[in-house]
Image: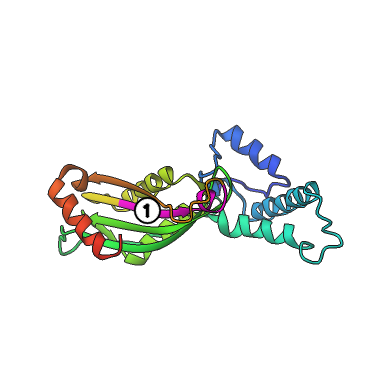
Amino acid sequence: MDTAFPHTTTGAIRKTLVAWGVPFRCNDNIAEHLHDRDLDTIENEVRRHIEDALQALIIDTANDHNTKETARRVARMLVREAFVGRYTAPPRLTDFPNAKHLDEIYTVGPITVRSMCAHHLLPIRGQCWVGIRPSERIIGLSKFTRLARWVLARPHIQEEAVIMLADEIEKAISPQGIAVLIRAEHQCMTWRGVQDADTSMVTSVMRGFFLDNATARAELMAILRGQGF
């Protein structure tokens, strides 16, 4: 953690990030540059702004028992749950040597993932599959779930989320081949706009062995179809 003392405002956090040349776009992780208590600062300021938004919507939160604590609840949800992948360090991914020199395909999925549309701040919910042809290192299967949920817990567009997840897995174990696929429902399509309840989006990344070898890619997809893809 680079920050010795907690910031007193989110403006001070932004100023520090700008000074250090640290990007803070919607799906960037800034945990390395935050003090532990900065999350309290962010949450408190978000709460005040959510309260302002409710007032702008002409909702009498002072006398309405339904929304009296809504700003506090929404702020905590955004900072500690929905966007927590921006503000916390990546999960620990203890890796192990590939002692038996396994070079066969293995897959993990479906992993339930949740995110939020960066354009409308509406929920994205779906499933993720990962295919690996390992190299020298491997990680436990549960670590794929932890990593996927950490990457997706930010405002996203799905096209970028699948690439970022593949990047993190590749960084962790440098496999011979990696495939990441996400199929998700976006409430910006199902709940608003065209309101098409049956639509979903599929994105995929294929690298290394799976990108270069059509037979391996076909084998992988056959395995994934057996897992519900």
Q: Give percent across and percent down for residue 18.
A: 60, 33
Residue pointed to by mark 1: 182
Residue at (86%, 62%) from the top-left corner? 63
What kind of residue is marked 1?
A: Ile
Residue at (45%, 55%) from the top-left corner? 185
Q: Can residue 96 be seen?
A: no
The magenta span reads: 180-192
28 or 156: which is nearer to us? Answer: 156
Residue at (37%, 53%) from the top-left corner? 182
- Element assignment for label 1: strand
Q: Give percent across and percent down for residue 191.
A: 56, 53
Is residue 187 within the magenta segment?
yes
| Residue 76 vertical position relative to residue 35 in the rendered view, above or below | below
- Relative to 48, 130 lies left or right: left
- Relative to 194, 3 lies left or right: right
Describe the colour scheme in one phrase: rainbow
Classify the position of the C terminus by image quarter.
bottom left
Q: Give percent across and percent down for residue 11.
A: 70, 40
144 or 56: which is nearer to us? Answer: 56
Q: Which residue is farthest right?
A: 63
Q: Give percent across and percent down for residue 61.
A: 82, 58
| Residue 217 vertical position relative to residue 100 in the rendered view, above or below | above
104 or 74: which is nearer to us? Answer: 74
Is residue 165 within the magenta segment?
no
User: Counting other residues with Cα less than 10 Å from the Cα at mark 1, is it few (<14), some (14-19), or many (20 or more)?
Assistant: many
Residue at (25%, 61%) from the top-left corner? 225
Q: Which residue is farthest left?
A: 215
